[in-house]
Image: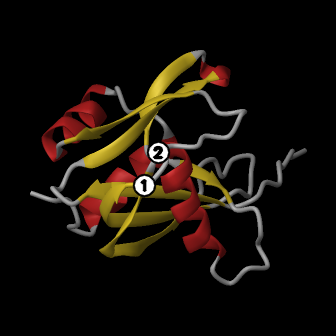
Amino acid sequence: MWTVAHRKGAVVVVPVTQDGNYLLVRQERIPIRATIWEFPAGQIDDTSDPDAVRATGLRELHEEAGHELSADGELTSLGIFFPSSGFTDEHSHLLLARGVVPAEGGARPDAAEAITECRAFSLAELTAMVASGEIRDANSLAAYARMSALGLMNP
């Protein structure tokens, strides 16, 4: 017998600053009893909106990281992935947000989120964090792998 958990889709956004650094948020994750570095992410609330993926990505960028796209910034789809296809139909959209800048008013995390900080990391630092296992959530690892496979990592 199979148990399937039906969940909303989600969006993972990879924020890249104008100087080429990657923004990560440090968030307390109760199920694993740890506070970890990860890319901002959140569930899609309004699936009837044809622009829901973009809207969710921009919302999470502002809420969790306190940043927004600059006037000349770009948001690029990196496709989808299934974070845990063994028990859930949840799928996550990966977005690359290039040219992000601090948003007026800073971060505005939801009351249920425990984000302790947001920090910029160079590509070398990000790669070292992935290699050492410091970054270990499926969302961030999938985004890193997809960017790497597509040749989108900044030098």
Locate residue 7, reporting x and y percent. Answer: 78, 54
Residue at the far right: name it.
Answer: 1
Residue at the far bottom: name it.
Answer: 50
10 is higher (above) or lower (below) than 5:
below
Locate residue 25, reporting x and y percent. Answer: 43, 37
Neighbours of disc 1 within 10 Å: few (<14), some (14-19), many (20+): some
Local secondary structure at mark 2: loop
Residue at the far left: name it.
Answer: 155
Q: Residue at x 86, y 45 (%)?
A: 3
Q: In the image, is 101 to the left or to the right of 25?
A: left
Residue nearest the viewer, comparing 92 with 95: 95
What residue does disc 1 label?
Answer: 103
Q: Residue at x 9, y 57 (%)?
A: 155
Locate residue 24, reporting x and y percent. Answer: 38, 40
How many marks the image carries: the answer is 2
Q: Residue at x 34, y 26 (%)?
A: 134
Q: Amino acid at mark 1?
A: Ala
Cα separation, mark 1 vs mark 2, equals: 5 Å
Local secondary structure at mark 1: loop
